Amino acid sequence: MKIGIVCPYSFDAPGGVQVHILDLAQELRRRGHEVSVLAPGESANYRGVTLTGSGYKIRYNGSVAPLSLTRKSWQITQEWLNNGKFEVVHVHEPLAPSISLFTLLKASVPIVATHHTATVRSLAMQTVSPLVRRWIRACKGRIAVSNEARRTLIEHLGEDAVIIPNGVFTSSYREAQAKVEWEQTPQRPVFSFLGRLDEARKGLPVLLKAIPLVLARYPQARFLIAGRGEAPEAKELQIRYPENIELLGGVSDEEKAALFAGSTAYIAPQTGGESFGIVLVEAMAAGTLVVASDIEAFRLVLDDGKYGKLFHTGNPQDLADTLCAALENKKERDELAKAGQLGSQKFDWATVTNQIEEIYKLAALQSQIPAENYETRAKLLRSLHENAAPGFKKHALRKHYNQLVRYLQAGKTKNTWETSDYAEEHRQ
């Protein structure tokens, strides 16, 4: 299958959506598909990626995102679409003011859209949604990476999506070796953090307040803080506890895996704005206990505490108590880490790509199958449902699948993804 994938964010800057797209493209090529990626950027050098030039940094979804809005980027996008001869185009973050939105306007082949953003209230999305609703409805398949992302789509656009989680090549984390200087010991437990240091929603301020509370009970504990950006408060605390806190700065993928492998626990103190939690899955795959805030996206990944420990969001005292409890009970810590490693397999790219391929097939066939041939479409949907990640079926996919089959069999809609009871409630 000839597949085009569009990323709205610059490949010159690292980010979760960019990594998601590169990994998906890699797995699709491994399965024999011909894949071309379109993204903003100038200096990045990746296989099968067409760059549209430098972009602008725009505040989007609680952070500053490098997007592309230039005339040059639009021209390159049009040429890419014309020359690609794609059977399906997969657009990520179709509402982002970038080449994703332009692709929705210009593509003449079936489009699959993946929504990553989780925004409770957004003036920008409320403003733009009436303008783009028609183009979003025209997509032949809609994916949300989490229930939070799905809810954002429904609340702002009145449209629904199938939940397919982000993917991870779990073997690269499962087989990672710890760096000696970062590795925990029985005497010196290691807690790790990874995230933008200058984005408050990543939760570093919460962690910094919890650290002295933990050190008061476990003075030998170490905290390894990784991530780009400036954090004066972290530097001040490091001066107070030079033997306990280390600021690592940005880390490579290999260093990230080594960091998780050597940690007693990985801390995810985010306060909101997260639609999934890919780093949690990576830490789980490494066999490391995850201690995370109880935002909905993280509860979903950790299956409400089955695969890790949760603490009250934004509460430093509860975070400190949770970390200390983990140190006090090695048996529970090891059991949760083992369960998390097993649970991470449902997010492996082998599983996730199976589901995405089904969406591609459905999107490509929708334009070819006569509207009255509901049995064929229902069969494709049944296959999608049967291959869905078990942890996500109960949240949205089973109900959504059954609704879609009923609509198809009743002949109520030509667009497979256009109607669901949940979406109808939010359209009114």
Image (tube, helix red, strand yellow):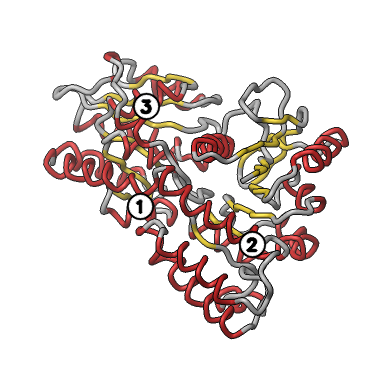
Q: Secondary structure at mark 2?
A: helix
Q: Position of residue 333 (x, y in %)?
A: 18, 41
Determine if residue 16 is in view. Answer: no
Q: Position of residue 170 (x, y in %)?
A: 36, 37
Q: Which residue is mark 1?
A: 312
Q: Which residue is mark 3?
A: 257
Residue extending furthest toward the bottom = 410
Q: Amino acid at mark 1?
A: His
Which is more N-terminal, label 3 or label 2? 3
Measured in 3D between alpha carbons, the distance from the residue under mark 2 to the one under mark 3, in whole angstroms, is 40 Å
Mark 3 Cα-neighbour bin, 10 Å: few <14, some 14–19, many ≥20 = many
Q: Secondary structure at mark 3?
A: helix
Q: Secondary structure at mark 1?
A: loop
Which is more N-terminal, label 1 or label 2? 1
Q: Which residue is mark 2?
A: 365
Q: Position of residue 28 (x, y in %)?
A: 53, 40
Measured in 3D between alpha carbons, the distance from the residue under mark 3 to the one under mark 1, in whole angstroms, is 27 Å
Q: Amino acid at mark 2?
A: Leu
